Image: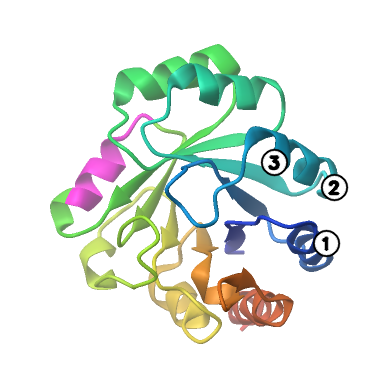
Amino acid sequence: MTKIKFCGLTRTGDIEAANELKPDYIGFVFWSKSKRAVTAGEAKILKSKLDPSIKAVGVFVDEDIEVVKSLLNDDIIDIAQLHGSEDGTYINDLKTSTGKPVIKAFKIRSEDDGRQAEESPADMVLLDSGMGTGKTFNWEIIKGVKRPFFLAGGLDPDNAADAVRTLHPYALDVSSGIETDGLKDINKMAAFAASVRKEDIT
């Protein structure tokens, strides 16, 4: 069963929608340059309203490792997702000192990027077209990737089933594809989840 991650949640209503639709993961963005960024305080309040069965992922770009550790150790997030130039030392330190999983994101432009992802010491990897581009990449490039991965980049209710059928990813990660006018749209969130789950059944 392909798992679902709704990323970039910022409002109580987003959490309520997630609690209703039951994705496996939701994401809080802690990168200040993102229009979906939240503070640690905001994330703590939102996490307190989240169904405990749903894992909260924190999205970071070259953040001070102590900041990430604090958010993990305080249970504001359950998993760290790294989108910057964080190396193996950073990843291993984070894993060892918190005991929490780490996802490393890779921007896919060639098969070499997929090979790098396969060698990452992170617990999980995410293959993307680039941080928040809202565009898909050439999926053919990653057909040789053997380790389980999150697929991101340009996903929406219309192409989610095709992604599951074509790549059999561990999870689909969606943000802008479930928004209307820059805000999460429960109807699009529901359509996305239904599309993934229907394809898994067929």
Q: Earlier in the sequence, mark 3 or mark 1?
A: 1
Q: CA distance from mark 3 to mark 1?
A: 14 Å
- Would you name the residue on which mark 3 appears? 43
Mark 2 and mark 1: Cα distance apart in space: 8 Å
Secondary structure category for the residue under label 1:
helix
| Image-based side of 78 in relation to 145, left or right | right
Circles 3 and 1 in contact, beta carbons < 8 Å: no
- Taking the spot 52% from the left edge, 66% from the top edge, the residue there is 174
Residue position marked by numbered label 2 in the rendering: 49
Q: Which residues are magenta?
A: 113-121
Q: Main secondary structure of the magenta part?
A: helix
What SS does tag 3 mark? helix
In front here: 114 or 68? 68
Q: Quadrant of the C terminus?
A: bottom right
| Mark found first going from the N terminus, 2 or 1 | 1
Looking at the rendered image, the quarter that the N terminus falls into is bottom right
Give the class, few, some or many, for how many residues have Cα within 10 Å of label 3's Cα (few <14, many ≥20): many
Which amino acid, mark 1?
Answer: Glu
- Which residue is label 1 attached to? 16
Q: Which image quadrant for residue 162? A: bottom left
